[in-house]
Image (cartoon, rainbow, N blue to C red):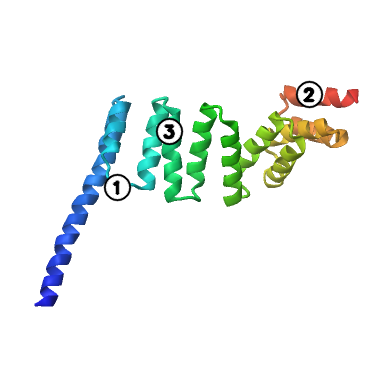
Amino acid sequence: MKRRFLLLLFAILSLYVKADDEDYASKFIQSYKKEQSGDIPGAISVMTTVYTDCYEKYIRLGELHYRNNDYISALRSFQLALEFKPRSVEAYLLVVQAGARLKDWKLVGDSYDKILDIDPDNKTALYYRGLLHYNTKQYQLSKQKLDHLIELYPLDYDGVILLAWCNYHIGFNTKAKKLFQLALCINSDSKSAREGLKMCGKK
């Protein structure tokens, strides 16, 4: 008797969970339909009725807020998503996008550092962290990130040309010249590389 009761209870719970899952998925489907029709506020409204707090809910909400140009709400949503999956590189990259829109460069830099803690060879984080250091004239720090990048992607033009300029500003003229020449081998139309070679010739 007890076994039959447990089997019946399990069957009822299975139906309940299945109905819940279908309702949960249907909210996302409704939200996508509203987004496709151009109703972004409506798509956001649907997602706020998803009662389950989870990673995918907040990523979806963040992307919708971002599309709606509400970057503060987008950032908040992406940060909530990270509470569920704190090692999510994709979530940190979305934080970077929202942070850049808000011109919160410290947040952007810190987020790239988090990504590199998780994935030390992440190409995007290596380049843009290096670029942020370069833009604040922290050339040695920039060089560290770009040296790592070029070890992994030796013919990445953006990395090579930025590393060339880093070396130039640090005073490594010979190394800078070689990198500007390499940049021209990758992209023969590079005005930056040609300018760099002229500058090296003046030293």
Q: Which residue is mark 3?
A: 74
Viewer-nearest of labels 1 and 2?
Answer: 1
- Left/right of residue 179 with respect to residue 6 in the rendered view: right
The residue tagged with tag 2: helix, strand or loop?
helix
Along the viewing direction, whichever of 70 and 37 lies nearer the viewer? 70
First reached walking from the N terminus: tag 1 or tag 2: 1
First reached walking from the N terminus: tag 2 or tag 3: 3
Along the viewing direction, whichever of 97 and 72 lies nearer the viewer? 72
The residue tagged with tag 3: helix, strand or loop?
helix
First reached walking from the N terminus: tag 1 or tag 3: 1
Quadrant containing the C terminus is top right
Quadrant containing the N terminus is bottom left
Q: Which residue is mark 1?
A: 52
Q: Which residue is mark 2?
A: 194
Measured in 3D between alpha carbons, the distance from the residue under mark 1 to the one under mark 3, in whole angstroms, is: 18 Å
Query: Vertical placement of 134 versus 118: above or below?
Result: above
Along the viewing direction, whichever of 28 and 83 lies nearer the viewer? 83
| Amino acid residing under circle 3 | Ala
| Amino acid residing under circle 2 | Arg
Label placed on residue 184:
none
- Left/right of residue 169 with respect to residue 122 in the rendered view: right
Residue at 74%, 34% in the rendered image? 138
Measured in 3D between alpha carbons, the distance from the residue under mark 1 to the one under mark 2, in whole angstroms, is: 56 Å
Viewer-nearest of labels 2 and 3?
Answer: 3
User: In the orientation shown, which residue stands out farthest toward the left?
Assistant: 1
| Amino acid residing under circle 1 | Thr
Residue at 84%, 32% in the rendered image? 177
Whether residue 186 is visible to the viewer of this picture, yes or no, is no
